[in-house]
Image: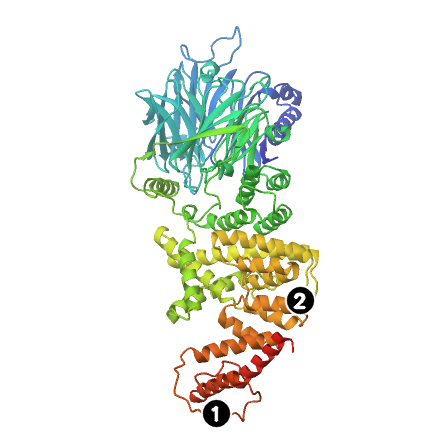
Amino acid sequence: MALRLVSDFDLGKDVLPWLRAQRAALVAAGAGGGGPGVLENNYESLRVLNVERNGNIIYTYKDDKGNVFFGLYDYQAKQNEHLYTFEKDLQVVSCSVNRERTLLAASLVQAAKEGRRNELQPGSRCLTLLVEIHPINNVKVLKAVDSYIWVQFLYPHVESQPLPENHLLLISEEKYIEQLHIQVTQEDGNRVVIKNSGHLPRQRVAEDFVWAQWDMSEQRLYYIDLKKSRSVLKCIQFYADEHFSLMFEAPLDVSLSDSGFKLVNFGYDDLQDQEKLSQHPTLCVFTNHTGSLCVCYCPNFDSWEQITYSVLYFHKGHGKTFTATLGCVDSRVTKGITFLSLDYYVAVYLPGHFFHLLNIQHPDLICHSLFLTGNSEVIDMLPHSPLQSLSGSLVLDWCSGKLYRALLNQSYLLEFLWNTRLDCEKLALLHCVLSCGRDPRRLEAKIIQWISENISACHSFDLIQEFIIASSYWSIYPETSNIDKLLPYSSLLTWDTEIPGITLVTEEISLPLMKVHSFKGYWEKLNSNLEYVKYSKPHLYYNNSVVRREWHSLISEEKKGKRRSTVYVRNILDNAIKVISNLEARNLEPRLTPLFQEEDNHQRLLMGLMVSELKDHLLRHLQGVEKKKIEQIVLDYVSKLLDLICQILEASWRKHNLHPWVLHFNRRASAAEFAVFHIMTRILEATNSLFLPLPPGFHTLHTILGVHCLPLHNLLHYIDNGVLLLTETAVTRLMKDLDNTEKNEKVKFSIIVRLPPLTGQKICRLWDHPVSSNIISRNHVKRLLQNYNKQPRSSMMDTSSFSVEFLPLNYFIEILTDIEASSPALYAFEGHDNVDAKFVEEAALKHTTTVLGL
C-alpha cells in the first residue's frame, strides 16, 4: 500500500480490556450489579469523543442502566483514567478536558428513546456542563439551550506549571463561537475548584459562520463566513494567555449554503443534522511546517461518472481543479471523498475508485503528483469508513475508534517504481520516495539499481538527470527554509503528456490578506511564501547558464595562451578543492572506480565556478542566513551532485565486477565494459544539458572504455562530436600501451591529429614512430619560420656537414641551422633538446623514402 497506517490507538485494544478489568474488580469486590458481560452488551456505545493537543484521547460509554461514563487514555503513559460519570441516560455531543485534568466540559442531549421523560432542564434540548474533577466536585451549567453546543479547551504551548486560568471555546449551532475564561484555585491541598464560578467572563470569537475547523496541534481556528454571498476564509490563532489574533482573511471561490453549518475536528459529529450536512461540500484546511496553506474542496456529487475536487495552494498563488473519471457507471459512489494531510503531500481518496497523492510543495506540474486508479489493491488500501485527518499526519476512524499515523510507505513505493510502466507515475514515485527521507544512502542505492535496469525505459524525461537534481534537492531542503524557491526541484520545466483518468484546470487565486504585522514560526514562513508569490516572478531557481559562459570563456583564453588574474583562477580552483575535501570527508568507503586520481583542471574549474555562482545566488536571495552557513550549504549541494554521479558509476562497476586492468589498452573489451561505457555515456548526456561538473578522472575513464569498446570510425565520431574528450592522461596511456601494429598506428595517428597543438606536441614525444617524428619536425619548422626575416646570404655554402646532395633540402637545412644558431635559447624545443635542424633533415628524408617506397 502507498500509505502505511500505523495504529497509535485502538478502543478495542487499549480501552476495552481495561474496562473489563475494572468491572471484574468491582464484581469481585461485590460493588457492582453486573459483570463483564454487561459491558460486552454495551460495547457499541463505546466511542471516541475527542483527541486533545497532547495526544490524550477522551472516550465515552454507557453501562446497562444508561449512565454515561467519561474516560481518558493517556497517550504518553499508555494508561486509562476514569474522569466522570453522569448518572442520567443522555447522549454526548461533545467533551473536552483541560491540560491539568482538573476540569471537564461536556455537552449532552436527551437520548432518543420513546416514552422517556426529559432529563434536561425544561425547554432545553442541549445541556453544557463544566465539572470539577480533581476531585469530583461541583458541576456548573454553562448553557441550557435548544441548539447543539460543542466544547473545546485551549491547550497553551507552556508545558511547565499549572496555569491559574483556563480557556474554553463554546461552538454553537446558532453560528457563533465564544471563549470562556475560567480561573481556578487550589483548596485543601490538591483540590482544584473554579474561582469565579458565579460569573465566567465570555468573549465573542466569531459569528455568522457556515463552516469551522479546529487545528488542535497549532491551536488555530479556521472558519468561513459569507459576505455579500462570497465565502471568506478566516483564521484565528490562540496564544498561551487569553489573547488571540485574526491572522488572515482569504476569499474563497467555493459554493456554500448559509442554511446550515459544518464543523471539522471538533470531535464526534454524529449528532449534526445529517440532512443539512449533505447540503455542505467536503472542505478542509491543511498546513505544514514549511509555511504551506492548502484548502481542499469537493462539492456535492452531481454525476456517477466523474468527480470534481479543487485544491487551493495559497502559498503558491494558484489553485487546481481536478476532474477524475470514476470508471464503471454502475460502480456508484457510496462513501464521501477523504482528504488527508501527509506532510509534503495531501492525499485525496475515494474508496473503491482512486487515490491521488498531491505534491503541495511543488504543485506546478501534475507529473509530480501520483494518481492511481483501477487497481483494487491501491484504491482499497484505506478503510472504507469515514476518516478524519487531524493535525499533522494523524487520522481518526470514528466508526472503529482507531487513531492512525499516516505515512508514505517507502517500501511499497519503491516496489511500485520497479513495476509501473507510465512515465508520469515513475516521475511522481521517484519524488515521493525521496521525500520520505528515511535512510537516504540505502534509498539512493535502490533507486540507482532501478535506474541501471531501466536506463532506456523513460521517454518523457531523463532518469539520471531527474534523480541527480531531485536527490540533491532533498539532501539540502529540510535543513533550510526558503531554499525550495532557489534550488531546482526537478529537471523538467513543463509537462504536456496526459495523465490517464484525470484532467485539471489551473487558475490564479487571490492571496490571503495578512491582518497582523509581526510574524513568528509558521506565520513568518507563510508570509515569506506569500511575499515571494507577489514579487518574485519569474522563478528564482538556480541554473548554470552564467557558469557555462564563464567556463567557456576561461577555456577559450587558455587555448589562445591568454591568462586571467592568477588570484581569480586560484580562488576558483580552491573552491573545487573544498568540494572534493567535503565529499571525501562524507564518504569514508574506498572507491572501486579510478576517479579523483588526476587533476583534470577543466572539471575543477567548472566545479569551482558553480560553487562561486551558487553562493552568490543564495547570498542575494536567502535572507536571514549566515554567510558561513550558506557557504556550507553550497559545498554540501555540489558535493552531493558529484557523490550521486560517483554512486551511479560505483554501482555499475560493482554490478559488472570490473577490475583495475580495464585501464590498460592492450586487451580486448568485455560485455561488462560495454555496459559501464553505456552508463557513463548516459551520465555525460544528463550532466551536459544541465552543465553540471563531473568527478575528475571521469573523462579519462570514459575515453579509455570508448577506445576498448568502439570501432575506430565510431570512436572518431564520438570524439568529433564531443562525447569523448581526449584528456592528456588517457592519450598518454594509449601511446604507451599500444604497440605499433598497422591498426594501432591508425588509432594513434587519428587521435594525435585531433589533439590541441600544445598537448599534441607533448604526446608526439612519447611515440617513437616516423609519423610522430614528422609531426614534431613540422611543428619545429613552423615555429622557427614564424618570425623569419630573409637576409642576404653568401653564395658559397658549406656542404660538408650534409650527408645528402639534394640542393633544395641542403639550402633549407642551412636556413634552419642559421636561425637556431642566432637565438639558441629562444628556439630550443621545449622538453626535447635533441630536436634541431639535423633532426628535421633526418625526418624529412625518412618521410620522403616512405612516400617514394624506397
> Which residue is under mark 1?
797
SS at mark 2 in the image: helix
For the point 49% across and 39% down, which residue is it?
Answer: 344
Q: Does 465 sit above or below residue 547?
A: above
Work out whether residue 86 or residue 618 is closer to the camera in this orientation and state it: 618
Q: Quadrant of residue 711?
A: bottom right
Q: Position of residue 268 (x, y in %)?
A: 50, 23
Foreground label between 1 and 2: 1
Q: Position of residue 688 (x, y in %)?
A: 50, 54
Residue 77 in view (yes/no): no
Q: Where, quadrant-wise, is the C terminus in this rendering? A: bottom right
Q: Check contact, mark 1 vs mark 2: CB within 8 A.
A: no
Query: Residue 743, labelled with which disc?
Result: 2
Q: Position of residue 303 (x, y in %)?
A: 51, 17
Near mark 1 (Cα within 10 A), the count class, few <14, some 14-19 or many ≥20, is few
Q: Amino acid at mark 1?
A: Met
Residue 563 in view (yes/no): yes
In space, the residues marked 1 and 2 are separated at their CA atoms by: 44 Å
Left or right placement of residue 839 versus residue 553 in this view? right
Work out whether residue 778 or residue 401 is closer to the camera in this orientation and state it: 778
Q: Amino acid at mark 2?
A: Lys
For the point 47% across and 48% down, which residue is it?
Answer: 478
- Between disc 1 and disc 2, whose residue precedes? 2
Left or right placement of residue 180 versus residue 299 in this view? left
